[in-house]
């Protein structure tokens, strides 16, 4: 049956900002586009939503198809919606973007219509890389969301293994925020924040000196009071 509505057809897509720490840098997962438009450029994993598909399901499907990652355990958070006219030169599209954080994942494998998949430093992608569509803006929004959520949620624990030292956690904050923090002040703030981290009773050697105490994520997702950048600096 032909389409007879007076309203234009608008396609819905999903794009996924996936962040991790690699080699002491904040990195984002990107794919090299194998087809026009923007063939050969880096882009965020994503694609068109199927007619019978919910949005988070589409995000997981596209992420898995294009990068080979096991998306079953990936926790997706809706980031924002992008619908500026002309953002896709093919036709009118609205994209629902998602944010995910992974702890030291394995290397991705390109699939579907992606010519390659890789972890790239977020700073390079934002300032020097040539990204397709409006993905630079989406990535910038995802990075800023992560920076902000470190202050008032336990998001930092998503960057590390299930058991971690306070030093591991401090490294997350330092890399994502982009500046050094006072170790003693950080340790006091984190361990005195109710429900943020719980001691495991175990220790791990991290070089010379006494082995460091190991922790796991606590029961509280929201931090009260928040660990603001200013409060952790001195």
Image (cartoon, rainbow, N blue to C red):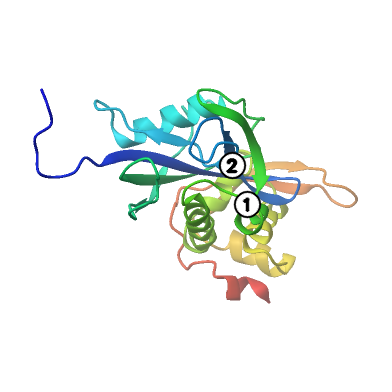
Q: Where is residue 78 in the image (x, y as percent from the top left)?
A: 38, 47
Q: Which image quadrant is residue 189 in?
A: bottom right
Query: For the point 55% across and 23% down, which residue is it?
Result: 111
Q: Mark 1 points at which residue?
A: 125
Q: Is mark 1 on a helix, strand or loop?
A: helix
Q: Position of residue 98 (x, y in %)?
A: 42, 45
Decide: few, some or many residues near mark 1? Use Cα within 10 Å; few <14, some 14-19, many ≥20.
many
Q: How crowded is mark 2: few (under 14 residues within 10 Å), some or many (20 or more)?
A: many
Cα distance between the residues tagged 1 and 2? 9 Å
Quarter holding the N terminus? Answer: top left
Instruction: Give x and y (percent) for residue 182.
Output: 72, 69
Horizontal arrangement in the rendering, residue 112 relative to residue 122 (left or right): left
The numbered disc on residue 189 is none
Viewer-proximal residue, 60 or 211? Answer: 60
Which residue is the site of mark 2?
A: 42
**Looking at the image, residue 183 lies above or below residue 85:** below
């Amino acid at each position: 049956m032909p389409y007879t509505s007076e309203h234009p057809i608008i396609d819905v897509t999903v794009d996924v900002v996936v962040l991790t720490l690699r080699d002491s840098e904040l990195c984002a997962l990107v794919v090299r586009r194998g087809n026009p438009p923007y063939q050969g450029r880096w882009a965020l994993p994503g694609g068109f939503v199927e007619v019978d598909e919910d949005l988070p399901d589409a995000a997981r499907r596209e992420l898995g198809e294009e990068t080979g990652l096991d998306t079953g355990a990936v926790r997706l958070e809706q980031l924002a919606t992008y619908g500026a006219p002309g953002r896709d030169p093919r036709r009118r599209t609205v994209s629902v973007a998602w944010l995910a954080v992974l702890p030291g994942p394995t290397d991705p494998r390109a699939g579907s219509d992606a010519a390659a998949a890789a972890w790239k430093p977020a700073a390079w992608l934002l300032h020097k890389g040539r990204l397709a569509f409006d993905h630079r803006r989406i990535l910038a929004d995802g990075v800023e969301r992560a920076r902000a959520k470190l202050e008032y949620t336990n998001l930092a624990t998503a960057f590390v293994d299930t058991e971690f030292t306070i030093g591991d956690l401090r490294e997350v904050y330092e890399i994502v925020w982009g500046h050094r923090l006072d170790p003693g002040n950080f340790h006091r703030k984190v361990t005195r924040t109710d429900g943020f981290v719980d001691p495991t009773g175990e220790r791990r050697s991290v070089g010379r000196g006494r082995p460091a105490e190991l922790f796991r994520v606590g029961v509280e997702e929201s931090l009260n009071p928040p660990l603001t950048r200013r409060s952790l600096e001195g």
